[in-house]
Amino acid sequence: MIDLDVATILARPGTCYWGYLDAAQPAIATVDSDTELSIEAVTHHAGDAPDLMMDDGVAAIWAGIPESARVPGVHIMTGPIHVRDAVPGGTLRVDLLSMVPRLPYGSNCAAHWGLLYDRFGKERITIYELNERTDCGGFGPTARPQFGFDFTARPLYDVPGVISPVTAVDRQPFGRIVDVPVRPHLGVMGVAPPGPGRRSSIPPGPFGGNVDNWRFGPGATVYYPVFHEGAGFYVGDPHFAQGDGEICGTAIEASLDVRLRLTALDGVAIDTPVLETATHWYTTHGFGDDLDAAMRMAAECMLKLLIDQAGFTADEAYSLMSVAIDLGVTQVVDGTLGCHAAVPKSIVGNLLDA
């Protein structure tokens, strides 16, 4: 373990783990509260176009972490990072400062876990390229689909990190020019989950994980309940863009270099991840086996937060939830489905100031 104040954490076999979350995972770094970090986040879909989405560093992760160790989930995590003064019952604040593409290409997989797979009966990869990339290496406003191909490397895309060799696929140009608004964000981010043992990286939970909310991008702040000393923070599953629902199975999966600030908060207690944007609190995230359960959880958590943090009575909060709070679908393709609830800052002000 290394001890850091301000640092860049590179994604490599020694700083990444693949497919699981585990509170016992050794920390790769310990930092003080209110520390800024640059962290490399790598997509597990880089093998969909290895000539475009893999460089030497990404290839080293594939070579250094065998397929047998990429279980029981699918995502590559960089971390965990321990934060001094982050204690169980407290809150970890994560300020997302910037995200820069590692490479200008990303992959979308219409997969067997997608919502409409029963209609299509096949899996298909579509590769997107960033359009109008800026001189400093950052994002332009859009990504453009370049080509697609039917996935044939396996009968199903059912193991993480599959490589589709360029010579083995029929890359078909996308039929028309389409510019997709870029929404860089992290699909997976959070803290070590409660309880012992390894758990799949796929289902999200109160610890965060695979929430897949496209609003977890630059300029946003995310708050997580802490379950273990040091929090055990990690990032993964970077995306160029995603819509609410993530309907066909994935977003535009692409590697990002992320700049963020980690701060341990005292006197702030939350039960699920809370997202702050410039105009709204996406104050709750609900998860469940179906959308009814996920939306019920989001609504219950919103009610609690409006009472405990905003100071409304239960009756007042319940009324406001109907006339001013928006409930939305986060994603519908991860087995555990997700919903979110949003309230304007003009109604509740600053909820989580410590």
Image: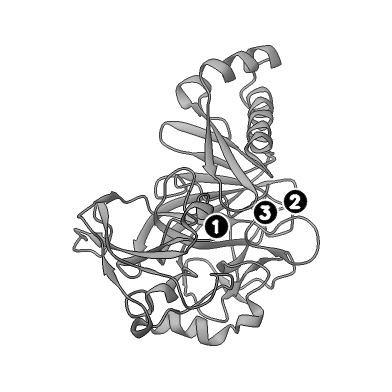
The residue under label 3 is 86
Disc 2 from disc 1: Cα separation: 21 Å
Task: Label 1: state its secondary structure.
Answer: strand
Which residue is drawn at the image coordinates 18% and 63% (left, top)?
135
1 or 3: mark nearer the eye:
1
Q: CA distance from mark 2 to mark 3?
A: 7 Å
Judge from the rendering whether residue 110 lies leftward or rightward of residue 302; answer left or right: left
In the rendered image, is residue 132 in sight? Answer: yes
Q: Which mark is residue 256?
A: none
Q: Give neighbour class at mark 1: few <14, some 14-19, many 20+ (Cα, 10 Å).
A: many
> Mark 1 and mark 3: span between their CA atoms?
20 Å
| Foreground disc of the pair 2, 1 | 1
| Circle 2 SS class | loop
* Number of the label disc, if any, that sits on residue 188: 1
To which residue does mark 2 refer?
Answer: 88
Residue 197 x/y as whole percent? 78, 66
